[in-house]
Amino acid sequence: MQGLGNDYVVIDNRQEQIGNKDAPRWAKYLCERWFGVGADGLLLVCPSQTADIKMRMFNADGSEAEMCGNGIRCFSKYCYENDIVKKSEFSIETLAGIKQVWLSVKDSQVLAVEVDMGVPNWQRVAVSMVGEGTCIDQPLQVDNEVYQVTVLSMGNPHCVSFVEDLEGFPVGLVGERLEIHPAFPQRTNVAFVEVRNCCEMSVRVWERGCRETLACGTGACASFAVARKLGKVQDKVTVHLRGGDLQITSGAGGNIYMGGPAEKVFEGKLFREEPI
């Protein structure tokens, strides 16, 4: 499945055929684009004791992520269309807490999904960043350059920096350096943002464990949260990503809502009993 070009292998794992020990190895194998299926990540559908269903998300390098914005839209569509949760509004357990989703359905097909992404956490400890308190619009040296960054958690860690020319910016070079910067012992996602006007932003994201992807839902939400906090945008914004657009809104209580599409690309059967 894919959400704005951010693609995932989705497996119904309610019978726990893939155990905790093997999940990282399966993710690395399945996400490998030459010898596996090829994807940015692996989504496992699991039973939940606290929500309608549980989502586990593994990056292409086998590391488990707390949350995934594009992934949860794909996950929601999969659960509805496969009669796992046959409701247009339901709850999903994630490592970042329980998330509520609303589905736009036509002729039994999910066209779009809106997700309550929760309230941003601005504390350094939430993203395992060195130091105390917050890091909002602060300088951070990367090799011989200094970048103004803001860090926050949208259930997973993000470092956001605003740039003048997003298309010409070396996202790969700087993103990789920031992901493994000593300030982030457990690594971080990195978003580079160009504000077009008060209602539009362009965002490119270097994802932890994946490299740059065509879209990142939590990265788009993190970028919006920072832009809103710094007074650069209004309460409702269209975020342009390389794979398409997301609608991000600030709601009552500071919650951030993300809306966008999800699509099924193909399905198949895997014959290998063990990952490489």
Image (cartoon, grey):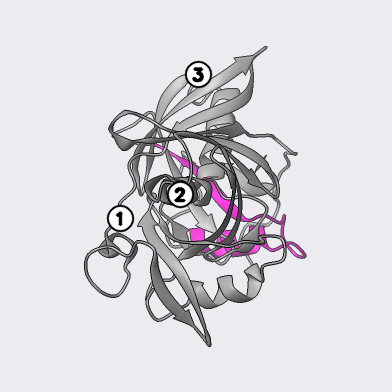
As displayed, is residue 265 above or below residue 143? above
Residue 227 got which mark?
2
Q: Is residue 174 magenta?
A: no
Residue 122 got which mark?
1
The furthest residue to the bottom: 144
Quarter of the figure with residue 212: bottom right
Q: Is residue 1 visible?
A: no
Q: Is residue 33 magenta?
A: yes
Q: Which element is circle 3 on?
A: loop
Q: Which residues are magenta?
A: 22-47
Q: Nearer the viewer, residue 1 or 215?
A: 215
Question: Could you tell me residue 249's position as x and y percent?
Answer: 46, 33
Identify the mark nearer the N-term, 3 or 1. 3
Question: Could you tell me residue 118's position as x and y percent?
Answer: 35, 39
Query: What amino acid is labelled 2 in the image?
Result: Ala
Residue beneath disc 3 = 86
Position of 77 with respect to 124 (left or right) is right
As displayed, is residue 140 above or below residue 154? below
The residue shown at (32%, 37%) is 254
Query: What amino acid is labelled 1 in the image?
Result: Trp
Quarter of the figure with residue 29: bottom right
Front tag of 1 and 2: 2
